[in-house]
């Protein structure tokens, strides 16, 4: 069982979680701690948003992450989308896939969700990204969108990182913490997601992952082993570990826009 005090979190304003990671439990020597703190200095500089969401207080790493699960219900079956880890700038802005480039609408909304008919919020494309983010969060919370599903958003790895460069994505978090430390955190991350599944997903609902760690962490023991080829061809079909009646589907990474859109359409529409 994971140590409950290793990684703790609490809900903040809608869309945000506040985490505390006890580094003294993660690393068992002063030398390991010092090496982490050296890496952390480089990590913080790797993306300008990192300084807004991370704080190191002695041996406690405090950071913000993202999660958006509507508390309202309606007649639509629930769908939980589980991504790898948050982008630092999206956590700073308070909304998943907040923008890309210099404020352009993110491809996830523009080229995957809307064309696949998975989620259409009818937003004006001339709005600023800040206004789009505000409206998008409000619409998700209030179920004010066109979709066959009632949709929730979460991440498997809670620590954010930049969208590009050597410290980006989950690879960047692996580099920051080390693989052994990541393995120590995985049971906690899994337990957090399973709690969401139990509270949000009904018998008609489904869960979709978009990244290897999420699939591996949630799949049943007899479900397919992750490979990018299987994700691209729609071969990742299983159920939530310990909850065999809840379907688990593994979509390609969102960066593979066309494939991701097609597989989602095949799975869900």
Image (cartoon, rainbow, N blue to C red):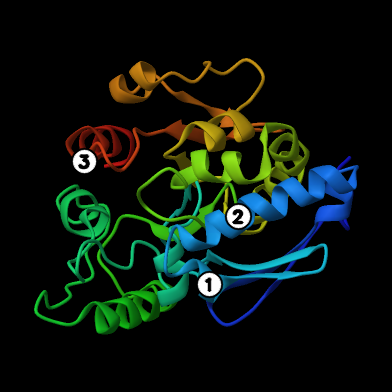
Mark 3 crowdedness (10 Å alpha carbons): few <14, some 14-19, many ≥20 = some
Asked which quadrant contains residue 41, the reply is bottom right
Instruction: Name the spot of residue 69 as percent of width and height, x first.
Output: 53, 66
Q: What's the CA distance linking mark 2 and mark 1?
A: 16 Å
Question: Which quadrant is the C terminus positioned in?
Answer: top left
Asked if marks 2 and 3 touch (Cβ < 8 Å), the reply is no
> What is the number of the mark on residue 158?
2
Left or right of 10 in this view: 133 = left
Asked which quadrant contains residue 221, the reply is top right
Name the N-terminal-most of marks 2 and 3.
Answer: 2
Residue 197 appears anywhere in the view: no
Task: Quickly name the residue at label 3.
Answer: 257
Instruction: Name the spot of residue 103 as percent of width and height, x first.
Output: 21, 71
Question: Which quadrant is the N terminus positioned in?
Answer: top right
Task: Quickly name the residue at label 1.
Answer: 51
Q: Nearer the viewer, residue 197 or 167?
A: 167
Name the N-terminal-most of marks 2 and 1.
Answer: 1
Question: Vertical placement of 78 versus 120: above or below?
Answer: above
The mark closer to the camera, 2 or 3, is: 2
Q: Secondary structure at mark 2?
A: loop
Name the N-terminal-most of marks 3 and 1.
Answer: 1
Question: Vertical placement of 127 versus 194: above or below?
Answer: below
Instruction: Name the spot of residue 59 as percent of width and height, x first.
Output: 82, 62
């Amino acid at each position: 069982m994971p140590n409950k005090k290793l990684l703790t979190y609490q809900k903040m304003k809608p869309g945000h979680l506040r985490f505390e990671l006890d580094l003294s439990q993660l690393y068992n020597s002063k030398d390991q701690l010092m090496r982490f703190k050296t890496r952390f200095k480089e990590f913080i500089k790797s993306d300008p948003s990192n300084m807004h969401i991370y704080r190191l207080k002695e041996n406690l790493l405090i950071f913000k992450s993202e999660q958006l699960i509507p508390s309202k219900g309606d007649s639509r079956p629930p769908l939980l989308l589980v991504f790898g880890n948050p982008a630092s700038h999206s956590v700073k802005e308070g909304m998943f896939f907040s923008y890309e480039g210099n404020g352009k609408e993110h491809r996830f909304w523009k080229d995957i969700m809307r064309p696949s008919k998975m989620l259409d919020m009818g937003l004006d494309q001339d709005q600023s990204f800040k206004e789009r983010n505000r409206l998008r969060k409000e619409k998700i919370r209030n179920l004010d969108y066109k979709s066959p599903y009632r949709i929730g958003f979460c991440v498997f790895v809670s620590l954010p990182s930049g969208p590009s460069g050597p410290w980006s994505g989950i690879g960047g978090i692996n580099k920051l913490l080390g693989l052994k430390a990541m393995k120590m955190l995985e049971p906690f991350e899994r337990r957090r997601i399973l709690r969401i599944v139990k509270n949000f997903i009904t018998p008609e609902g489904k869960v979709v992952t978009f990244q290897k760690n999420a699939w591996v962490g949630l799949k049943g023991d007899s479900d397919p082993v992750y490979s990018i080829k299987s994700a691209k061809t729609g071969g990742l079909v299983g159920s939530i570990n310990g909850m065999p009646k809840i379907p688990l589907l593994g979509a390609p990474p969102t960066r593979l826009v066309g494939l991701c859109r097609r597989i989602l359409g095949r799975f869900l529409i």
